Amino acid sequence: MTTFVGVEDMVRWLGTRGPAATITGIAARLEADLRRWPEFEKRERIASHTPFGVIELMPITDADTYAFKYVNGHPFNPARGHQTVTAFGVLASVHTGYPLFVAEMTLLTALRTAATSALAARYLARPDSRTMALVGAGSQSEFQAIAFRELLGIDQLRVWDIDPAAMVKAVRNLAPLGFDVRAATSATDAVRGADVVTTCTADKVRAVILADEQVEPGMHVNAIGGDCPGKTELDPAILERAAVTVEYEPQTRLEGEIQQLAATFPVTELWEVVAGRAPGRRSPDEVTVFDSVGFALEDFSALCFVRDDVAGTDLFRDIDLVAEPDDPKDLFGFATHGAPVH
């Protein structure tokens, strides 16, 4: 049998743990996995692009566990009453090939993305950071805010979105959580004086959501909206004067903000910073950028964290996903036992 955590189970699990504890737990697991980065077999995600969006598979494995996530990105979906991003993930045994754990990952991806962003910021942002500008108030915004408060101490938020309803939604959800939050009048208004700027928009276009002149000395830019070829959010001039950290360089060269720059542009992978092999922030005035496109290790860590945390609870069910004949060589007999064969 295969352990399955569906949407209802995931919502109950999140309600039991709470978003803050869940995000910090995922971040801790990810930090530990980043420290053993060389143990993983890695590759860029496998993407199928259409005029409507993208469908991707994100695989990764260590010596014992193979993982993958199926995920889409369809920016026109909300107008049709659908989510922009949906996902599910699988953990399988390297030794048998059997799928051991399956989980919904629409919610879990939001949690792991926020955990990754805040973990990176703990190494890259100024430690006294308290104010964050959220440029883009979609489904990620509340998770990002909670993550940055838990891991970095952010408690003041300025929210900007071209959709006024999205800003109202973000303020409505975040104010009761104790944040000092307000809707900004423009991106410039949101960014002015911020310690951290998070950009997260959905349109699949080369855009300048954040201009170079808006970025002040010492800012940390958490760029999480550019995640496929032809989709960017930052003025390239920001990157050229910043220290840029990425998740997995071969993937980010194709999909991240640095797709706008020469292939020789220098970047640092996050695992190097976490493992102490490369510096994070070098000075209070340095501009740092986390050019995040999402990487399979983050899904691996999140899936493992959920699997371990729900063990021994009623927050999962077993599903009959793999045929198990008594005689492993007699699949035909298993399939036709007690049934007429035509």
Image: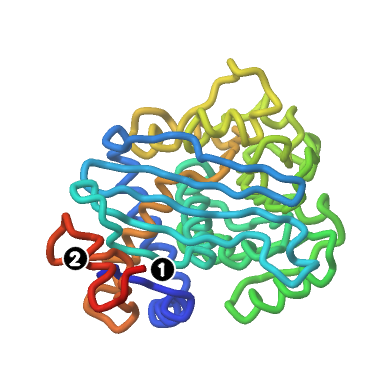
Q: Earlier in the sequence, mark 2 or mark 1?
A: 1
Badge 2 amino acid: Pro
Viewer-proximal residue among 150 and 315: 315
Residue at left offset 52%, top offset 58% = 114
Q: Position of residue 277 (x, y in %)?
A: 35, 28
Local packing at callout 1 (Cα closer than 10 Å; few below 14, some 14-19, many 20+) is many
Quick check: marks 2 and 1 in contact, CB under 8 Å?
no
Tell me which residue sits at (72%, 63%) in the image. Answer: 137
Mark 2 or mark 1, whichever is nearer to me: 2
342 to 275, vertically: above or below = below
Q: Secondary structure at mark 1?
A: helix
Q: Which mark is residue 22?
A: 1
Q: Give how far apart the Cα atoms at labels 2 and 1 are.
A: 39 Å
Q: Is residue 279 left or right of residue 148?
A: left
Q: Nearer the viewer, residue 282 or 275?
A: 275
Location of residue 319 (image quadrant): bottom left
What amino acid is labelled 1 in the image?
Thr
Where in the figure is residue 226, as x and y percent of width and height?
67, 43
> Looking at this view, is 139 or 194 the one in front?
139
In the picture, the quarter occupied by the N terminus is bottom left
Q: Which residue is tagged 2? A: 325
Residue 41: x %, y % from top left: 33, 35
Q: Quadrant of residue 177?
A: bottom right
At 72% across and 53% down in the image, what residue appears? 202
Task: Give above or below for 326 relative to 298.
Answer: below
Establish if 84 lies above or below 56. below
- Picture residue at 59% right of the left edge, 63% below the top: 145
Q: Nearer the viewer, residue 204 or 235?
A: 204
Direction front: furthest residue: 342
Residue 248 pos. (x, y %): 47, 34
